[in-house]
């Protein structure tokens, strides 16, 4: 039976591919998508989400909700902004924008409207009215999920699992300590971590290896040659250029890019795509100092606090690629 999931996204190039995989794979029943502020302002992440939903042609089946435009409390402490962090784009000497996420996708403007209810009402109704347990897949900052769990923690009675793209143990990308999604709303991330839900965390230590797509894989997408595979190739070009300009050396080969968020959806389809799993205690630092937004993953054998999370450190890149390519072929 297809797994019921709700994606929470800050679309975003890899978020876009995660939406396409979830919408096209027969083992997933995508109950809806909620946009959040993150890679780009909410106005952009919402519009980009709607454009992708229309590209895949599921606008009459998959509702889109408009989530939070700001983090829960992070920007109330402006001193945090003095900690160094990397901007996710650069302007080159000719004035060209180079980054992982262009402000708007090169797709037709959307005509679909988001749902009328506020996102919390929509989440609560969608989860509680579902005859089977729902898996939440947040792949952006955790603001919407933190707000939802504060508003009505009883939704967890009908939540199977929360699969989060975020954090890092030995790896980081946005600040020296903070992976972008967790850094962008550390309080919300800690609320989710302490919620008592079954949580699987897919951090950079895993996505950098397992969700990496290389230019040498492009032929397999070109062979499919439909609007979805073509769009993924376009996004991969942006992401490879982004890695080269902003994080040179982060990938095993410079002609490749990680599609972090997509790995969470691939895991919902086939859990064996992830391995090297550690069930342990994870908390998020929200001190406002240099470790702000760090996922503190306890690797000790003498842990003080109860386990709350399973962290994936590895997986099968070939399996990941096969799952994504097979789903692209389902586009009609
Ligand atoms: C995460 O941050 C965003 O840039 C990506 O969409 C992904 O969710 C990786 O750190
Ligand atoms: Ca994302």
Image: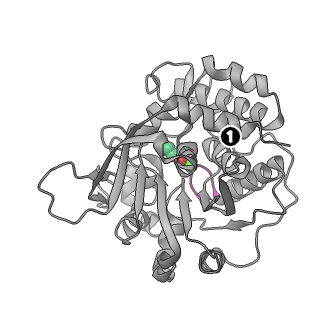
Residue 106 magenta-highlighted? no
**Residue segment shown in magenta:** 35-41
Residue 107 location (% of width, % of height): 82, 43
Q: Main secondary structure of the magenta part?
A: loop
Residue 157 location (% of width, % of height): 48, 78
Residue 36 magenta-highlighted? yes
Residue 189 location (% of width, % of height): 41, 62
Q: Is residue 271 left or right of residue 221?
A: left
**Residue 214, located in which quarter of the rendered image?**
top right
Q: Nearer the viewer, residue 250 or 193?
A: 193
Circle 1 is placed at which residue position?
102
Residue at 73% in and 48% down: 24
Q: What secondary structure is marked by label 1?
A: loop
Q: Nearer the viewer, residue 164 or 106?
A: 164
Quadrant assignment for the C terminus: top right
Is residue 83 visible in the rendered image? The answer is no
């Amino acid at each position: 039976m297809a797994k019921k999931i709700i994606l929470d996204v800050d679309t975003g190039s890899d978020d876009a591919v995660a939406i396409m995989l979830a919408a096209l794979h027969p083992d997933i029943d995508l109950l809806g998508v909620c946009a959040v502020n993150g890679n780009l302002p909410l106005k952009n992440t919402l519009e980009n989400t709607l454009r992708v939903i229309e590209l895949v042609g599921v606008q009459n089946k998959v509702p889109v909700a408009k989530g939070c435009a700001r983090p829960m409390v992070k920007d109330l402490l402006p001193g945090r902004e003095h900690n160094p962090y990397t901007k996710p784009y650069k302007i080159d000497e000719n004035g060209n924008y180079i980054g992982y996420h262009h402000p708007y996708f090169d797709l037709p403007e959307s005509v679909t409207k988001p749902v009328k209810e506020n996102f919390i009402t929509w989440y609560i109704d969608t989860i509680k009215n579902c005859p089977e347990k729902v898996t939440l897949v947040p792949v952006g900052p955790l603001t919407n999920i933190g707000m939802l769990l504060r508003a009505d923690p009883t939704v967890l009675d009908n939540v199977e699992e929360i699969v989060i793209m975020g954090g890092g143990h030995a790896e980081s990308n946005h600040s020296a300590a903070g992976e972008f999604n967790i850094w962008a709303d550390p309080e919300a991330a800690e609320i989710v971590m302490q919620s008592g839900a079954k949580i699987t965390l897919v951090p950079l230590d895993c996505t950098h290896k397992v969700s990496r797509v290389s230019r040498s894989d492009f032929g397999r997408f070109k062979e499919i040659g439909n609007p979805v595979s073509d769009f993924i190739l376009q996004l991969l070009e942006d992401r490879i250029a982004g890695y080269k300009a902003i994080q040179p050396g982060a990938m095993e080969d410079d002609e490749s890019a990680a599609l972090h968020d997509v790995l969470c959806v691939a895991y919902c389809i086939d859990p064996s795509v992830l391995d090297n799993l550690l069930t342990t205690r994870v908390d998020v630092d929200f001190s406002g100092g240099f470790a702000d937004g760090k996922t503190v993953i306890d690797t000790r054998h003498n842990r003080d606090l109860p386990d709350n999370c399973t962290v994936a450190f590895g997986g099968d890149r070939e399996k990941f690629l096969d799952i994504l390519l097979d789903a692209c072929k389902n586009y009609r």
